[in-house]
Image (spheres, rainbow, N blue to C red):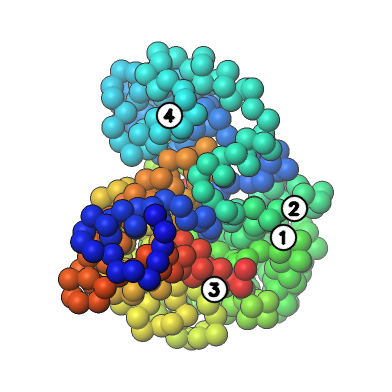
Amino acid sequence: MTLSAEPLRGHDSIAAAVTETVGAAKVVDMHTHLFAPAFGPLNLWGIDELLNYHYLIAELFRVAPIRYGDWWEMPREEQADMIWSELFVKRPPISEATQGVVRVMTAFGLDATAPDLREARAFFAAQDAAAHAERVLDMAGVDWLVMTNDPFDGEEAALWRAGVTGTSRYRAALRLDRMLNAWPEACELLQAGGYAVTEDVTGDTFHEGRRFLDDWIERMKPLYMAVSLPSDFVFPDDSARTRLLRGVVLPTCLEHRLPLGLMIGVRRQVNPNMRLAGDAVGRADITSVEHIAFEYPQVRYLITMLSRENQHELCVSARKFRNLLPFGCWWFLNNPSIVREITQERLEMLGATFIAQHSDARVLDQLLYKWPVSRTIIARALTETYVALADAGRPVTGADIQSDVDRLFRQNFCAWVGA
Ligand code: FIX
Ligand code: ZN
């Protein structure tokens, strides 16, 4: 099909044009937990990693009466075997996360009804990490992606210090969770690194905190800085977080012209026995988003909220503050039924001025399910939008669709971060 200025007539031709355009889009995946192959052990891929995804670990605990402590002591391959047996063999894999593994296996021609993982393990063992990464990005139609880079993670920081860097397909985002959510811990790490900061956030802390960020910005060359925030996030208040935001993080954003990613609404470790799988969601107070957007109008925020209940008010806030760019359907929201609803709502309230989706992939091969599913659902929401527009009397062309798809899947983000 050629994209032209010819009006598309009727639901079916609009649906076909949208499906083709969204399917062919070379997306920029603006938030993942993936690492370039040069990061070695941090670059997760293959069947054992796919099965040990924390979304699936949570589902395993619902069906298998295994004790948490026993689970964490099992070798990684045995864990993957148990997840395969419990969630894929003993019962049909109907949840979104289990269907995802099926999609990945299908993409590689692997048998998703196999009783064990022999074939899948042999397939992945035969791949070269770097070549596999290129292939998966190409298959998923991901032009390039953004990692999550944590200077407070000892293993990751050591790699950066040793000279490992991002690449043109794996760009960096400087993650500030420990600084803004666990300052006493971060403070000790900074002090050990020679930065004269204090736990009570006074004196040299502001200058030295900024020097720390400057150093990591120089090293990582991030496209943005980011933090995940709890559902009880308040701004402003008299906490260390507000003082650090005002005195360290936001001035650094302004000086380096870096956007700040705010990911709001997580309740970390409601069940610590489940480790990474033990986080939950809570409704957050949108007024704090409005306060920070208002107080720093020159800072560009990338913003996502985890609670379904926050989505509508986030759209309203984005209509009031042009420095808010809503992005993606995060984590527990990344299910077809909810992606559909959120995308429709955003299209109605914001036009194409948001970022349609990010993958949040932790395992490279997950790109092969998260993106196809998102593309399909977002294409449905877009189709309805264009059909309604055509019904209203404004003919829709292939070129119209192409320009909106570009905005939603890459341009809005690239313009925001200056990439
Ligand atoms: O904070 C985050 O960036 C979250 O996306 C993750 O920490 C979370 O564990 C996840 O993998 C969600 O998809
Ligand atoms: Zn994430």
- Residue nearest the observer in this picture, 243 or 307: 307
Mark 2 residue crowding within 10 angstroms, few (<14) / some (14–19) / many (20+): some
Residue 88, percent from left and from top: 35, 23
Q: Determine the CA span between mark 1 and mark 2.
A: 7 Å
Q: In terms of secondary structure, where does tag 2 sit?
A: loop
Tell whether label 2 touches label 1 (CB within 8 Å): yes
Mark found first going from the N terminus, 4 or 3: 4
- Asked if disc 4 is less than 8 Å from ligand 1, the answer is no
Q: Which mark is residue 165?
A: 2
The answer to whether residue 405 is left or right of residue 151 is left
Circle 3 sits on which residue? 416
Q: Amino acid at mark 1?
A: Met
Q: Residues within 10 Å of mark 3 (few under 14, many from 20)?
A: some
Residue 371: x %, y % from top left: 44, 47
Tell me the CA gap for discs 3 and 1.
18 Å
Q: Position of residue 291 (x, y in %)?
A: 42, 82
Marks 4 and 3, how far apart in space?
36 Å
Residue occupying image coordinates x 33% and y 39%: 96
